[in-house]
Amino acid sequence: MADYRELLGSDEEDTLRKLDVEIHASSVSFKRKLRESDMRAVAGILISLKNRTNDDDYHIALGDWIHQADEWFGRDVGMHWVREEVKRNAYRDYLQMLTGASLIQLQILEYFVHCCCSALGLKTKNGKTLDLSDFLSSDPNHKNEMLGTLKGALEKASLFNRGFEERLAEFVEKRNRFVHDFWLKALMDPSFSNRPSFEALARIEEFLSGLLKEAVELEAPFRGLLYSIDKGMAERFNLRDDMRNGVFVEWSKYEKDFLSVANKPI
């Protein structure tokens, strides 16, 4: 049987050392009686380690933990706690997957924003073409300046109504929070600790799911804007064959999404 102790993270090793707990190749041993919170922390580590190994034999270590928990805290307590910690770990794994899905969707949306800025030739005050790096700058001063420039450019182009502009500005704030320090602040929050409460996990889920939902919904208007730009060019230059292109026809369904937030067609 392989020794999976090398898969332990440094924080996990520190926790086990402080609690005088030793994990062996297929078992776990305790040098002193632990409090409930400490036992639960050990269970979380064992469950995480088991998930990394994907080895059924590793149930032996969990069995040792359950036996010890029952001995210290009462019959069937160990299994009850394990089920709760499994649920907690699964919730955290789900949030990590939700984080990945949000990142992918953000990149898709940002691609369309970039395409729209480039196609419209929006420029800053010094004549530089406005691009994605300006729109999503992490520098507060630069970001505020560029958001103002973008807002002014969009108003000048008479593209979006005020409600959509405000919605977009709020989304950019949430996007920057997510990309730069959201998880770091979550991990540093005392309520998260080694065993985050289900309430803390629910707050994270609420933010991530809201961000993902908004990114999905914002994609359609920008797809519609790109379609409207291409449609205008095709009509201007009498490119009727291009307008019958399968991709072009497929994107026509997004035109209504753009028009629903536009001041007027471009």
Image (cartoon, rainbow, N blue to C red):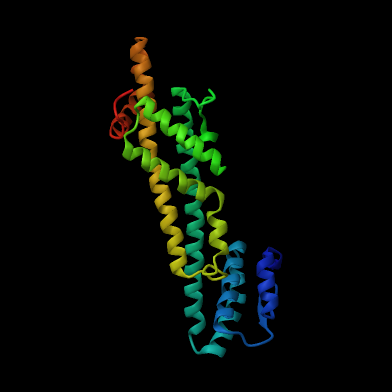
In this rendering, is residue 141 above or below 196? above
- Which percent across, then down, holds residue 12? 65, 69
In this rendering, is residue 24 above or below 33? above
Residue 28 in view here = yes
Q: Please tell me which residue is depicted at 54% across the width and 71% down the height of the picture.
A: 195
Q: Nearer the viewer, residue 17 or 241?
A: 17
Q: Please tell me which residue is depicted at 63% across the width and 88% down the height of the picture.
A: 33
- Which percent across, then down, holds residue 27? 66, 77
- Which percent across, then down, holds residue 191? 51, 69
Total label count? 0
Most extreme residue toward the top is: 238
Would you say 6 lies left or right of 62 here?
Answer: right
The N terminus lies in which quarter of the figure? bottom right
Q: Nearer the viewer, residue 252 or 81?
A: 252
Q: Nearer the viewer, residue 266 or 161?
A: 161
Q: Quadrant of residue 120?
A: top left
Residue 22 in view here = no
- Which percent across, then down, holds residue 35? 58, 84
The C terminus lies in which quarter of the figure? top left
